[in-house]
């Protein structure tokens, strides 16, 4: 059970953060040991980097953004992932696929460079399972809640490109479940919970 890294992916407003929080509540109820963090963010240092990246006042070049994301990921790897592998379930709100979807398919940075940087930071580490939250085109950008950041200002075409990128990335990944964000929260909570039970061998 405790060697699982489970990732929640999706564009802004897809419901991934809501659902990772619901899974957290469920694991607490089931007394399953876990940690949860978001990317960018997680450790104190990573949260500082997150605030820099997403600030409305930031006008970084795309390559600078990429390097900041990987710097934040390295902090998480060293301080959160490595110490907890085989000890706790690791839940991550956005991870490697987001970097490729946003920085390659969104901003057109060379994919090999992103792959090389991910390998430099993470080595052979890969998530065990991915919940990908898909947003129908007509709903893109409609469900973004909370304080808006720099990425929330990008247009619908940008987010469509990113989501199409996610689909290409995950096409060959068998360890995934697509979550239709247009379905009710109740329906998707149950869908995700059932899959979590199978992944972690939890019995209701």
Image (spheres, rainbow, N blue to C red):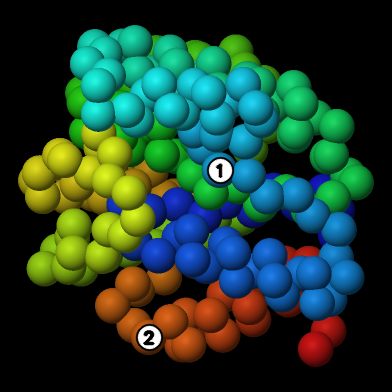
Closer-to-camera residue (72/133): 72
Locate the C terminus by quadrant.
bottom right
**Label 2 CA crowd tier, 10 Å (few <14, some 14–19, many 20+):** few
Please give left or right for residue 194 compared with residue 168 in the image: right
Query: In the image, what residue occupies the spot 62% across and 36% down?
Result: 42
Closer-to-camera residue (201/150): 150
Q: Considering only vertical position in the picture, is 25 above or below 140?
A: below
Please name the residue that numbered disc 1 is placed on: 38
Q: Considering only vertical position in the picture, is 138 above or below 182?
A: above
Please name the residue that numbered disc 2 is placed on: 184
How many discs appear?
A: 2
Coordinates of residue 49 in the picture (x, y in percent): 49, 21
Coordinates of residue 43 in the picture (x, y in percent): 66, 30
Contact? badges 2 and 1 (CB < 8 Å): no
Which of the numbered marks, if any, corresponds to residue 191? none
Query: In the image, what residue occupies the spot 46% across and 28% down?
Result: 50
The numbered mark, 2 or 1, whose residue comes first in the sequence reads: 1
Closer-to-camera residue (162/78): 78
Coordinates of residue 80 in the picture (x, y in percent): 75, 33
Locate the N terminus by quadrant.
bottom right
**Label 1 CA crowd tier, 10 Å (few <14, some 14–19, many 20+):** many
Q: Considering only vertical position in the picture, is 32 above or below 191?
A: above
Give SS at disc 2: loop
């Amino acid at each position: 059970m405790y060697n699982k890294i489970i990732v929640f992916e999706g564009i802004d407003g897809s419901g991934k953060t809501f659902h990772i929080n619901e899974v957290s509540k469920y694991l607490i109820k089931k007394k399953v040991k876990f940690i949860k963090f978001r990317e960018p963010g997680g450790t104190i240092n990573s949260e500082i980097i997150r605030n820099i990246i997403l600030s409305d006042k930031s006008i970084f070049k795309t390559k600078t953004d990429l390097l900041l994301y990987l710097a934040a990921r390295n902090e998480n790897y060293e301080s959160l992932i490595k110490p907890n592998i085989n000890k706790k379930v690791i839940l991550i709100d956005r991870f490697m696929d987001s970097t490729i979807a946003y920085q390659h398919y969104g901003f057109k940075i060379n994919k090999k460079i992103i792959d090389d940087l991910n390998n430099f930071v993470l080595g052979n580490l890969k998530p065990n399972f991915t919940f990908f939250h898909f947003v129908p085109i007509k709903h893109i950008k409609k469900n973004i809640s909370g304080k808006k950041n720099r990425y929330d200002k990008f247009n619908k075409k940008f987010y469509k490109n990113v989501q199409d990128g996610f689909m290409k990335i995950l096409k060959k990944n068998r360890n995934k479940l697509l979550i239709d964000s247009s379905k009710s929260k109740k329906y998707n909570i149950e869908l995700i919970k059932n899959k979590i039970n199978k992944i972690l061998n939890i019995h209701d």
